[in-house]
Image (cartoon, helix red, strand yellow):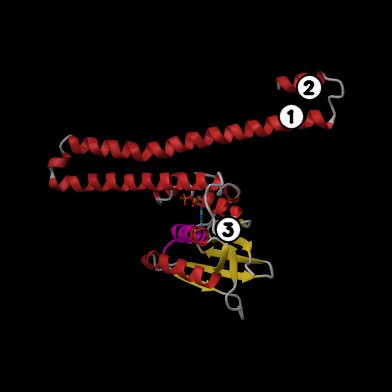
Amino acid sequence: RRLAAYVSRLPGAESAGAVMVLHDITDLRRLERLRQDFVANVSHELKTPLAVIQSNIEALQDGAAEDPQARGPFLERVKHEADRLDALIQDLLRLAKIESGEQPFELGRVPLDAAIAECLERQATRAEAKSMALIEVPPKNAPKGVAAFADEDAMEAILDNLVDNAIKYTPSGGKITVRWTATDRHVQIEVEDTGIGISEADLSRVFERFYRADRARNRAAGGTGLGLAIVKHLVQSLHGQVTVASQLGKGTTFKVTLPRAA
Ligand code: ADP
C-alpha cells in the first residue's frame, strides 16, 4: 500500500509500468502466503503423528509395557504413526524433487494397456476387500500398442495415486472404471469412481498440498494429503494436463492427458 501511494504520486502513474509493479508485489505476497501456509501445514502434519508416538511411548514407560495384554495396542499405534510419518516424509521429498526439476525422467513409450492392467493388478486385493469392481475399458477397436510418451515410474505413480484414491473414497460395493482413448497426438486416461464425490467448493483445491475435502475424516482414511499434488506435478512435468469433475454423493472422474508416443 505504501508503494501504491508512492507510485500514484509519480508523474504518469497510470502507465502500464506502474501497474505492473503493483501486480508483481501482489504475486510476491501471494507466494509468500502460500509458503507460510505450506510450512505451517508441514509442521502440523509432522507433529500430529509424533505427538501420538510420544504419548504411547509414555504410556508404555508408565507400566503398560509390563502388561502383556495392554502392550500390543500401544505398540501397534506407535508403529502405525511411525509408518505415517515415513509416508509423509517420502511424499514431501518426492514433491520437492519433482518441483525443483531434480527428478530424472526417462521419457519413452509407455504402453497404456499394460500400464493400466498392471496398476489394477496391484490394487486388486484392496478392491476385493471392499467388494469393488475394478474395470479397464479400452476404446472400441483399440489399435495395438498405443503408448504415452512418458516416464514409466511417473505413469505408475499417477495411476496408483488416482486408483488408490478412487478405492479409498468409494464405499464398499462400488465400481472403479479406468478408460482410455487416443487421438493422433494425445492419450487420455480417465479414472472414474462411484464414490462420495467432491463438492464444487472443494473441487478447485484438491490438487493443493495437504488440502482435504473433509479434513478429519480423510486424514483418518490414511493418506498424506499430498497424493494429488504429486499427480499434478508429475503430469505437468510430462507436458500433460490433469482435470477433475465430480458430483457429491455420485462419484468423481479424474482425466489425465499426455502426449502420445509415435
Ligand atoms: P489424501 O491423502 O487425503 O487422499 P490427496 O492429495 O490424494 O490426499 O487428495 C486430496 C483430497 O481430495 C482428499 O483428501 C479427498 O478429500 C479428495 N479426493 C481425492 N480423490 C478423491 C475421490 N476419488 N473421490 C472423492 N474425493 C477425493
How packed mark 3 is, by other alpha carbons closer than 10 Å (few <14, some 14-19, many 20 or more), is: some
**Image position, residue 28 (x, y; %):** 65, 32
Residue type at numbered disc 3: Gln
Q: Nearer the viewer, residue 246 or 149?
A: 149
Q: Residue at x 42, y 69 (%)?
A: 121
Residue 236 counted in the magenta span: no
Circles 1 and 2: CB atoms closer than 8 Å? yes
Quadrant for the C terminus in the image? bottom right
- Give the distance between the C-alpha atoms of the residues marked 3 and 2, in whole angstroms: 47 Å
Q: What kind of element bears circle 2?
A: helix
Residue 247 is tagged as 3
**Image position of 71 with respect to 142: above or below:** above
Q: What kind of element bears circle 3?
A: strand
Q: Most prominent secondary structure in the magenta stretch?
A: helix
Highlighted magenta segment, given as a residue range: 158-172
Quadrant for the N terminus in the image? top right
- Give the distance between the C-alpha atoms of the residues marked 3 and 1, in whole angstroms: 39 Å
Q: Residue furthest right?
A: 12
Report the residue marked by disc 2.
7
Residue 151 is tagged as none
